[in-house]
Amino acid sequence: GQNIDQPTEMTATEGAIVQINCTYQTSGFNGLFWYQQHAGEAPTFLSYNVLDGLEEKGRFSSFLSRSKGYSYLLLKELQMKDSASYLCAVPRGTGGFKTIFGAGTRLFVKA
Amino acid sequence: NAGVTQTPKFRVLKTGQSMTLLCAQDMNHEYMYWYRQDPGMGLRLIHYSVGEGTTAKGEVPDGYNVSRLKKQNFLLGLESAAPSQTSVYFCASRPGDRGTLYFSSSYEQYFGPGTRLTVT
């Protein structure tokens, strides 16, 4: 939606590291979110970046480059429970009232 | 705190029938949203509200109406259901603006568990 692009699917092995990329339109930037969504469940918040650089939170890190309109989510020491969809999202409009979501990346973690 | 709740959890409608989905939040959030989620398309914004008594259209508003008569409730109505409205519907809420972009709590959305609607 509205030029937020993410890969559709990725597969990785338990214990490995995986990087999920997201590109977005840079105009009217109000920050960028990553959400995790397990099958049949609601999305839950993972991270928020508004400044360039890497934000680390345990096994998950999120990177942002505002000039390139690019972000990635880095998952380390993958566990089976990390199998889920990962949604990139950007607030849009005055005050960031509307959040536009990418289609999500389905991550499969295999043993 | 129950957070964000949605009723019903599941519903099957026939084409042309009407129904209302109810979203309730107990976090005193200003903003509330209705999304639909379809395979391969992610979450699409239907309508949203920035406060009691106000609503606005999102990306895909056609065929839906909303009301926000009380701050804690946001209702989504389908007046004449169509098979194209078969989807999973999520409600979300978030606090109002705090005058800065630099606090994630200003923009993080809290989602309800979803309503799975099938229109036959």
Image (cartoon, grey):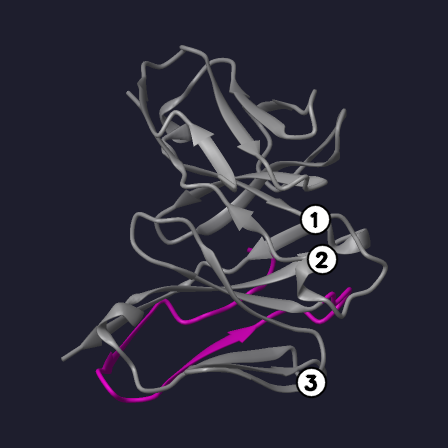
Q: Please, what secondary structure does the residue beneath circle 1 have?
A: loop
Residue visible at 53% across and 30% down? B23
Under mark 3, the amino acid is: Asp
**Mark 2 neighbour class, 10 Å CA radius: few under 14, some 14 to 19, many 20 or more:** some
Residue visible at 28% across and 20% down? B120
Q: Check residue B95 in the rendering and tell me which mark sits there, or answer none.
A: 1
Q: Which of labels 3 and 1 is toward the front?
A: 1
> Same subunit under labels 3 and 2?
no
- In this picture, is B72 found above or below A90? above
- In this picture, is B93 found above or below A55? above
- Find out whether the residues at labels 2 and 1 contact each other: C-beta distance under 8 Å: yes
Residue visible at 52% across and 42% down? B3
Question: Chief secondary structure of the magenta span?
Answer: loop
Residue found at the very far right of the displayed protein: B99
**Mark 1 neighbour class, 10 Å CA radius: few under 14, some 14 to 19, many 20 or more:** some
Under mark 1, the amino acid is: Pro
Q: Disc 2 and disc 1: Cα gap in Å?
A: 6 Å
Q: Quadrant of residue A84?
A: bottom left
- Find out whether the residues at labels 3 and 2 contact each other: C-beta distance under 8 Å: no
Q: Which residues are magenta?
A: A1-30
Residue found at the very far left of the displayed protein: A111
Q: Earlier in the sequence, mark 2 or mark 1?
A: 1
Q: Position of residue B49 (x, y in %)?
A: 70, 35
Q: Disc 3 and disc 2: Cα gap in Å?
A: 19 Å
Q: Which residue is mark 3?
A: A52
Q: Quadrant of residue A52?
A: bottom right
Host chain of mark 1: B
Work out whether residue A3 or residue B22 is closer to the camera in this orientation and state it: B22
> Same subunit under labels 3 and 1?
no
Host chain of mark 2: B
Q: Position of residue B42 (x, y in %)?
A: 45, 53
Left or right, A4 with reference to B86: right
